[in-house]
Amino acid sequence: MRITARIASAFAAALITVMHCAPIASAVIPPPIDNSLLPPAAPPAPPQPTEQRLPCTVSLPAESGVSAAQFAGFDVTAMWRLTRGAGQRVAVIDTGIAAHRRLPDVVAGGDYVSTGDGRQDCDGHGTVVAGIIAAAPDQTDGTGFSGIAPEVSLIGIRQSSNKFGPLADPGEHGFGDVSTLAMAVRTAADMGASVINISSVACAESSLDDRALGAALSYAVDVKDSVVVVAAGNVGGDGQCPGQNTTAQPRVIASPAWYDDYVLTVGSVGSDGAPSEFSLNGPWVDVAAPGENVVSVDPDGDGVINTLPTAAGQASMSGTSYAAPVVSGVVALVRSRFPRLSARQVMTRIEATSRHPAQGWNSAVGNGVIDPLAALSDHTNEPLPQQTTRSSTPIPTQPEKNHRYAVVGGSAALCVAAVMAASVRLRRRTEDVPTD
């Protein structure tokens, strides 16, 4: 049973509440779902006039000799003998999806940033995310990269951008907040997305009002039967989550991740399976997936990239926002292979088949690193072991400083460290968040 389902009824009136469990447990829960706050069905559009403030990201193709190793722990060939995701629609709520020859099936989902249709990407991030989910194999690609579920259809929704700003505030760079995210979730669900990927995180050290987002997530899962996969969030620098959670009671709240009963929250691990130092811990973390030294399609060309530009030059791509689409791709495969499973049954299956930590669930990797082939197996035991320990397991201390990861503070999964009463902005600062 997922964490908020166990405790929400006791604190239905609280916005942010701590529950004390035996003997040292505590958990932070989101505000109760208020379906009256569900955004109305409406054509996607920015809530206010915007303009482009910064030039679009221009990336460099991957150098010769680069190998796409982020899926090295998965038997992709065996997975694809079972399914490649045909029949599934995966919504990517992000910075848009640029046209790319290896992303042949992208449906326009709408634009909450400017006047596009969701198939424009000035930041590059959404295209990278989309490639991890669905890029078609290419024998001419020397890196060996391909997406997890190459036969899915993608729905491109531009919900945020670091390159645009509100026309009414000339000094503001970045557009998109929890309100537009709620609208985008409603749109994706209404468009029939069987999977919704959100690689955006709003972080706060105190209260934040994201009740409309909670209502949209509830609608997507329980009304439209969508599986919503979200990034856990990153720490390590300006423009990211303000610090690591290292005790049983989280200091940093992450949204939409903390709506644990409605989303699959994904932390990041390296190629060795160890938690990434930048990956935000929390009682809402469900599973983990590879999120370091990523290769994906080039948002500004027809090849692949393994770096994105920063103020200091090109830097390798790492972040929980790149771990989340790995899980989204696997979820699409499961939904294609087992079409009768409900969204909640799929979520449980992904958790149950993960490679569980030796001591059971923990707040860095949740139920463990995903095991796609096990999730696709006909013989899956769905009950989760040691679920009672979830809310009583202290958050691990931060990994040792010599733990390998590609970029210090690596890629913030569209994360902002701010406390705002009504609107927490979701934005990426390229000067601070080089890889995400």
Image (cartoon, rainbow, N blue to C red):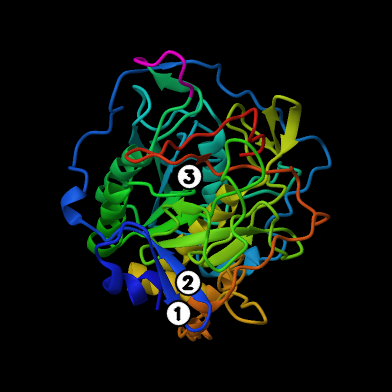
Give the x, y percent position of residue 16. 37, 58
- Nearer-N-terminus badge (3/2): 2
- Nearer-N-terminus badge (1/2): 1
44 vs 423, nearest the viewer? 423
Disc 1 crowd, CA 10 A, few/some/many (<14, 14-19, 20+): few
Give the x, y percent position of residue 337. 43, 70
Is residue 160 rendered to the left or right of residue 15?
A: right
In the displayed structure, would residue 220 be above or below residue 55? below
Helix, strand or loop at label 1? It is strand
Which quadrant would the C terminus be assigned to in this image?
A: top right
Q: Is residue 341 visible?
A: no
Helix, strand or loop at label 2? It is strand
Q: Is residue 424 found inside the magenta-colored segment of the image?
A: no
| Mark 3 to mark 1 CA distance (whole Å) | 30 Å
**What residue is shown with label 3?**
200
- Nearer-N-terminus badge (3/1): 1
**What residue is shown with label 1?**
21
Main secondary structure of the magenta stretch: loop
Where are the magenta residues, as a range?
Answer: 167-173
